[in-house]
Image: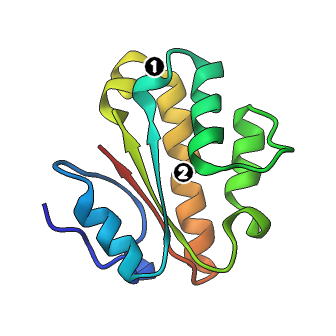
Amino acid sequence: MKAPDLAKIDDACVQPWSGVLEPLKAAAAQAHLRYRVVDLGKARDRASLFAELDRALDLPEHFGKNFDALADVLEDRDWLGKGGIAIVMLHGNAYRDEHPHEWSTLEELLGEACEFWKERMTPFWVFVA
């Protein structure tokens, strides 16, 4: 699968991804974005979901490990920095099937973050693999 041009801020959103991750990693590097992989295969419950998000996204120490805190952090310039980010949610489809309510909330927050950063001309991409 061919990666989109991650420098196109208007196209940044939550979207599906299939295939190897190398094209996404290369596209993120070319667009000068941070690239992070969140392995949702390690998330068995809400606590482990937040632990994996915290680990993979290098969230700030004050992250409260709940959805409200995640929403705040995802829209925090101190965390994101001056550039944007490309996030891959590995095993996202399996997590969605096993935890539909939590996935719905997570996907909504990620989508809101994409829109928030788009308005600020900063690319925020999420790929569900």
Q: Is residue 55 above or below residue 78?
A: above
Q: Could you say where residue 90 lies in the image, as x and y percent from the top left?
A: 36, 39
At horizontal 70% and vertical 44% (from top left) the residue drawn is: 70
Numbered disc total: 2
> For this rendering, which residue is in front, 119 or 122?
122
Structural crowding at the residue carrying mark 2, measured as other residues with C-alpha within 10 Å and reported as few (<14), some (14–19) or many (≥20): many
* Rendered image: mark on residue 110: 2
Q: Quadrant of residue 28?
A: bottom left
> For this rendering, which residue is in front, 76 or 59?
59
Q: Is residue 127 above or below residue 24?
A: above
> For this rendering, which residue is in front, 51 or 73?
51
Q: Residue furthest left?
A: 1
SS at mark 2? helix
Q: Could you say where residue 69 lies in the image, as x and y percent from the top left?
A: 78, 42
Quarter of the figure that contains the N terminus: bottom left
SS at mark 1? loop
Q: Quadrant of residue 100?
A: top left
Q: Is residue 125 above or below residue 128?
A: below
* Rendered image: mark on residue 99: 1
Q: Residue furthest right?
A: 62
